[in-house]
């Protein structure tokens, strides 16, 4: 099978890394890819939003399956356009991708399916939203309905902050059309867990649960980022709870969509909080998580290419559920100093070649200098991942790797998976 992966981050490097281990995969292309994916296949210099050129590349390179990393091309209808040309592609259609691109619609699907989720109300004008917010208990979760590149959720700690946020979003239109509709949502408290399933629209096969860390500094201080680290599995989501989550959240969502005439194929990611009253969904994404993928795939024993191919074209009920290594995985993101604010680029990265071969360094914000040296080119530079028999062991290894790979001003959190230190796995 010849595979094309669309995307350029550490998530896509992890997908390519795992696909490269499949006996069914003969060649891998990544568009646009990064220096990490270039070591495992061929990078094609096409941006993720140039669907026309991606179609051309898939046809030209006789691609049997395309796998899409980021949400933007899915929300823009890449799957519909590939399918019109008879190309096989894993992912939801534009209509189905609204599960992520419209939080208002996703909430209506959850409510129709009876999926446990945070209570929320929708507002389309500033005055009604502000009036409602003033009556809500603190903190208040304010969400722009549309895609906002990670900037669409604000947890307001005071009524003044809530009103100011609503004014920015709805009057000053700081997020553009994304905040034409805004959700005011109940604030949930508990452990935040990512549950990712692969589905053909009827059967959904859950992957192992994982936790990511969104704030830039230790102890969840500082601003939100694209993710500073993750670990997998999550001991408090035991196999029994996974069965319950599949039965009460993942499967009813896929069934509800089918009833609404939407066959949802590809990856369905539920971001949830384990509240004292049970799991509650905060949001759905229509793709793999980043950095979750970088810790889930190193534990996957089964063939990712087969799972994705069947999700795109076939029947996942014909195969066994995914099999997993009995181990823990911890991933630490090395970021440029200053991220998520401004930061320098073009800084030489040392130590990648001599990294412990049991560790993986998934590239994100890296590029090759004219002389072939790997230099920084983005905020999140690399995800270093280690596996081990226990979280303590995986942590020790991953932090040895994180301190071995060096670049000026590098920043990483030191507390990834620290809460699981005393858990066996
Ligand atoms: P989202 O884009 O919906 O994942 O939201 C971004 C982050 O905001 C989540 O990862 C949570 O940490 C937080 N968040 C979102 N919704 C809620 C909620 N209802 N209660 C508490 N925290 C939330
Ligand atoms: N890790 C959060 C996300 O991928 O949206």
Image (cartoon, rainbow, N blue to C red):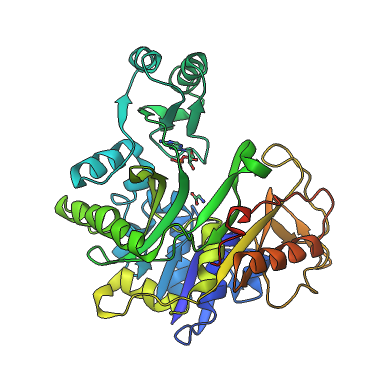
Residue 308: quarter of image: bottom left
Q: Nearer the viewer, residue 60 or 227?
A: 227
Residue at (48, 87) in percent of width and height: 23
Total tally of numbered discs in the picture? 0
Q: Nearer the viewer, residue 409 or 278?
A: 278
Tell whether 251 sits left or right of 369. Answer: left
Quadrant of the drawing holding the N terminus = bottom left
Percent x, y of residue 123: 32, 23
Percent x, y of residue 168: 50, 20
Indicate whether 135 appears above or below 377.
Answer: above
Can the viewer see residue 364?
Answer: no
Can the viewer see residue 406?
Answer: yes
Indicate whether 175 appears above or below 35.
Answer: above
Percent x, y of residue 35: 68, 66
- Most extreme residue toward the left is 259
Tell whether 146 sits left or right of 359. Answer: left
Residue at (31, 79) in percent of width and height: 320
Residue at (75, 42) in percent of width and height: 343
Indicate whether 70 appears above or below 5.
Answer: above
């Amino acid at each position: 099978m010849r595979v094309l992966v669309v995307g350029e981050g550490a998530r896509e490097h992890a997908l390519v890394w795992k696909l490269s281990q499949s006996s069914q995969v003969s060649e891998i292309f990544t568009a646009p890819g990064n220096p990490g994916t270039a070591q495992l296949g061929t990078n094609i210099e096409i941006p993720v939003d140039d669907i026309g050129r991606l179609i051309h590349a898939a046809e030209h390179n006789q691609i049997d399956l395309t796998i899409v990393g980021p949400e933007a091309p899915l929300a823009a209808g890449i799957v519909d356009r590939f399918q019109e040309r008879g190309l096989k592609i894993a992912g939801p259609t534009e209509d189905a991708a609204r599960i992520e691109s419209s939080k208002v619609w996703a909430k209506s699907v959850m409510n129709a399916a009876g999926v446990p989720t945070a209570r929320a109300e929708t507002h389309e004008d500033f005055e009604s939203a502000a009036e409602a917010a003033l009556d809500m208990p603190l903190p208040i979760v304010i969400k722009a309905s549309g895609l906002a590149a990670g900037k669409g959720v604000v947890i307001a700690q005071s009524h003044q902050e809530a009103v100011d946020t609503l004014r920015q979003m709805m009057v000053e239109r700081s997020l553009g059309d994304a905040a034409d509709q805004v959700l005011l949502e109940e604030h949930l408290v508990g452990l935040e867990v990512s549950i990712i399933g692969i589905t053909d629209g009827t059967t959904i096969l859950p992957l192992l649960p994982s936790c990511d860390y969104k704030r830039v500094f230790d102890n969840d201080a500082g601003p939100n980022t694209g993710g500073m680290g993750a670990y997998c599995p999550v001991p408090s989501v035991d196999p029994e709870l996974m069965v319950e989550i599949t039965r009460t959240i993942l499967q009813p969502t896929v069934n509800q969509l089918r009833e609404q005439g939407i066959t949802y194929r590809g990856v369905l990611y539920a971001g949830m909080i384990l509240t004292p009253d049970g799991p509650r969904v905060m949001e759905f994404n229509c793709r793999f998580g980043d950095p979750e993928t970088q810790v889930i795939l190193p534990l996957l024993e089964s063939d990712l290419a087969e799972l994705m191919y069947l999700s795109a074209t076939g029947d996942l009920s014909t195969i066994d559920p995914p099999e997993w290594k009995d181990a823990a995985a911890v991933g630490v993101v090395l970021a440029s100093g200053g991220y998520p604010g401004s930061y320098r680029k073009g800084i030489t990265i040392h130590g990648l070649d001599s990294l412990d071969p049991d560790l993986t360094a998934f590239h994100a914000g890296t590029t090759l200098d004219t002389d072939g040296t790997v230099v920084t080119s983005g905020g999140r530079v690399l995800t270093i991942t280690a596996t081990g028999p226990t979280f303590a062991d995986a942590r020790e290894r991953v932090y040895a790797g994180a301190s071995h790979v060096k670049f000026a001003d590098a920043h990483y959190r030191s507390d990834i998976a620290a809460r699981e230190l005393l858990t066996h796995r």
